[in-house]
Amino acid sequence: MIIIFTGAITGTSDMQQQQVGKKELLFIDTSAWIALYDQDDAYHMDAVRFFTPDNLLMRRLIPVTTNFIFAEVYTYFCRNHSMAVTIGQSLKASKILKLLHVEEADEAKAWEIAQKYADKDFSYTDCTSFAVMRRLNCRKAFAFDTHFSQMGFEVLP
């Protein structure tokens, strides 16, 4: 099982430390968490290769996710309670992952998005993710979900 790195990223040079202000947020979608933790997922190896401390540091990315994504990930894995709890503890203990709460204003924007895009099959959680990303001016998503690119975000890997 993958455990999300719980320590700070170490080994940064003075130059890298000076570039902290130039870091970008990377939104982590449910599809990416599932790919990371589910070895049977079609994107598992792509996710594991991409989501490393070295890669995040090199790209100067700060991973963020929301409590709505956390809920989806827990729900997906809860068929194995022990695994769901271990994953949840890993996400909550991470020193580099920012676990954000969807705000009331985000939900209002999410509902606007849900109503506006009748031709898309966005989930409500997708819509909250888009609203949070817009609020934070986050342009990149680690996802294996086409909805993020449909909304104009850069999808990694």
Image (tube, rainbow, N blue to C red):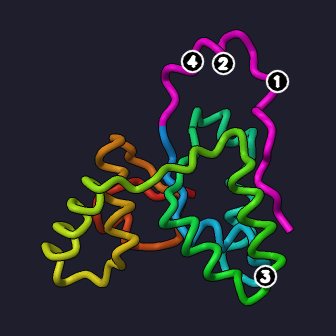
C-alpha span from label 3 to label 4? 40 Å
- Residue found at x 57% / y 21%: 20
Amino acid found under the numbered disc labelled 4: Gln
Given contact means CB atoms under 8 Å apart, are the residues at marks 2 and 4 in contact?
yes
Location of residue 147 with respect to 90 vertically, above or below: below
Segment colored magenta: 1-24
Q: Position of residue 111 (x, y in %)?
A: 21, 69
Amino acid found under the numbered disc labelled 3: His
| Left or right: where 49 falls relative to 110 | right
Say which residue label 2 marks.
16
C-alpha span from label 2 to label 4? 5 Å
C-alpha span from label 2 to label 1? 9 Å
- Residue found at x 86% / y 68%: 1
- Report crowding for label 2: few under 14, some 14 to 19, many 20 or more residues within 10 A (C-alpha): some
Amino acid found under the numbered disc labelled 1: Gly
- Report crowding for label 4: few under 14, some 14 to 19, many 20 or more residues within 10 A (C-alpha): few
Say which residue label 3 marks.
81
Q: Position of residue 112 (x, y in %)?
A: 16, 67
